[in-house]
Amino acid sequence: MNQQTSDLKIFEQYFADHEKEIFDDYSTFLQFKSISTDKAYQDEVHSCADWLIKHIEDIGFETELWDTSGHPTIFAQNLNAGPDKPTLLIYNHYDVQPVDPLELWKTPPFEPTMVDGNVYARGAQDNKGQCMYVFQALKAMMHEHDSFPINIKWIIEGEEECGSEGLAGILENKKEPLAADYLVIADVGIAAVDKPSVTLGIRGIITMDVEVIGSNTDLHSGTHGGRAYNPLHALAEVVSKLRDCDGQVTVPGFYDDVDEFTDEERGQVDFAFDPDEYRDTFALEATGGELRYAPLERSTVRPTLEVNGLSGGYSGVGFKTVIPAVAQAKISCRLVPRQDPKNVGEKVARYIESLSPEGVTVKVDLHEGGGGALRASPDSDIIKAFAEGYSVVFGKPCGFTYEGGSIPIVTELARTCGGDVVLMGMALDSDQIHAPNEHFGWDRFQKGFLVFTQTLSILGKG
Ligand code: BES
Ligand code: MN
């Protein structure tokens, strides 16, 4: 038996022996309602951080809770491997998305429930599940060897799901603690359940609120219909002008800094898309976005503009004949490398305002949180180490993939850390993150745990 297989056996056995206690920790972590975007949950966010930091301390880390203008960030380190060994900075987040619409959950979102090998709860995957297998991997390594094979730093933030504005504000002062040879972002996925893959890129994001203001009060749609410009109509007209019929974004200059994906880059990944599987899983055809690109290309390495919410007027039961005083939209753009979030945000905001029909006012509030796209080099040592870790655990070669989602702080964090980056995780597109019935496969939790123990051992051997 070679070293890799024997490491794998040790930690498979550890997982089997400790399965109940691992699940209990995970379950407790999931019960905190750490919804970062809603101030009503601030105390729960803090309790969650307190619980987690205590557990991290208990497995041999020095810890600090960093206050930010938003929610606190957990920082932990164990540098006992010494200066001859590399230092790995790990990134996770302990906050979660809101749970509405609550009535669509089959089990309560903060009462984790295992059904057919999947754990259902808000955060089950994004990102508490992935944070918890990292925790369990570190705990297991400490248990088996009383030390780590490399130096470890760990940052776990509490406001990823609302743009990381607070953390962004303190990074400048945290250069020294965050310095590391490598940075691993453990908040993404694999290409498919049987396709181990390391992620080479993630898109950036900007978000904004749009408000269309008409009259100073709601109006009777009989009395005023035909005279007043309805803000909901104005908003619908504005929104419909943001993309053409081929799915291209029409904002002037939107694509200025967008590089075409090169053939070399295309050769590294599998952009094969199975329309039948997509239809089976989501009851949907892939007809959205820039139609001249392949579905997976346009949802991972091309920029987008999407409306995430439209509201105004009456949408309760029955009917109300009203011309609302105001209408609102929430809009986000996904960005690719070289697109500057602020710059693109300004272009979109000014264009939207310029489309305002006469008689109403369109205002755009660009949000502060957000960040640029991140790309990792497939040739770096850290990517090679994780790819090897995946391939040992899955028993097959590891490929590469790209992620269309965003983690706002990653570009700034990578700059602060100064090391090479790898994006890893065990997510699948079908985990229903951010939606009702979010879930994570217990088998993938275990595989994530094993990829971590395996890769850390590999890094320790140099
Ligand atoms: N973990 C996700 C990013 C992600 C999405 C990874 C899909 C893999 C698949 C992250 O927590 C996330 O949801 N980010 C938000 C950021 C936003 C709220 C500022 C996103 O991408 O929408
Ligand atoms: Mn998320």
Image (cartoon, rainbow, N blue to C red):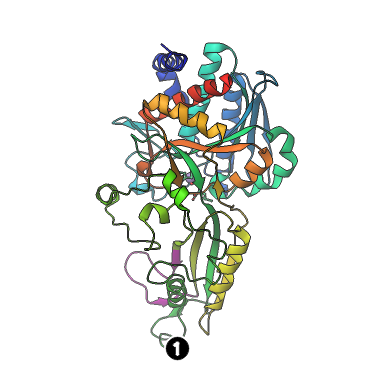
From this view, report whether residue 13 is shown above or below residue 69: above
From this view, report whether residue 399 is shown above or below residue 262: above
From this view, report whether residue 250 is shown above or below residue 93: below
Q: Mark 1 — residue? A: 227
Q: Judging from the image, what secondary structure is the residue with disc 1 in?
A: loop
If the image is split into quadrants, where does the N terminus sit? top left
Residue at image position (33%, 71%) is 319
121 sits to left or right of 115: right
Residue at image position (63%, 42%) is 414
128 sits to left or right of 417: left
Q: Nearer the viewer, residue 91 or 459?
A: 459
Residue 152 drawn at (x, y percent): 62, 26
Residue 375 drawn at (x, y percent): 55, 46
Q: Nearer the viewer, residue 32 or 233?
A: 233
> Residue 106's quadrant in the figure?
top left
65 sits to left or right of 244: right
Please say whether residue 375 is one of the residues in the magenta stretch.
Answer: no
Residue at image position (28%, 47%) is 281
Dot 1 amino acid type: Arg
Please say whether residue 321 is one of the residues in the magenta stretch.
Answer: yes
Q: Nearer the viewer, residue 222 or 187?
A: 187
- Residue range of the region highlighted in magenta in the rendering: 310-325
If the image is split into quadrants, where does the C terminus sit? top right
Judge whether residue 93 can be spotted in this image: no
Q: Residues within 10 Å of mark 1 (few under 14, many from 20)?
A: few
Magenta-highlighted stretch: main secondary structure?
Answer: loop
Residue at image position (44%, 67%) is 248
How many marks are shown on the rendered structure? 1
Residue 339 drawn at (x, y percent): 58, 58
Q: Nearer the viewer, residue 312 or 296?
A: 296
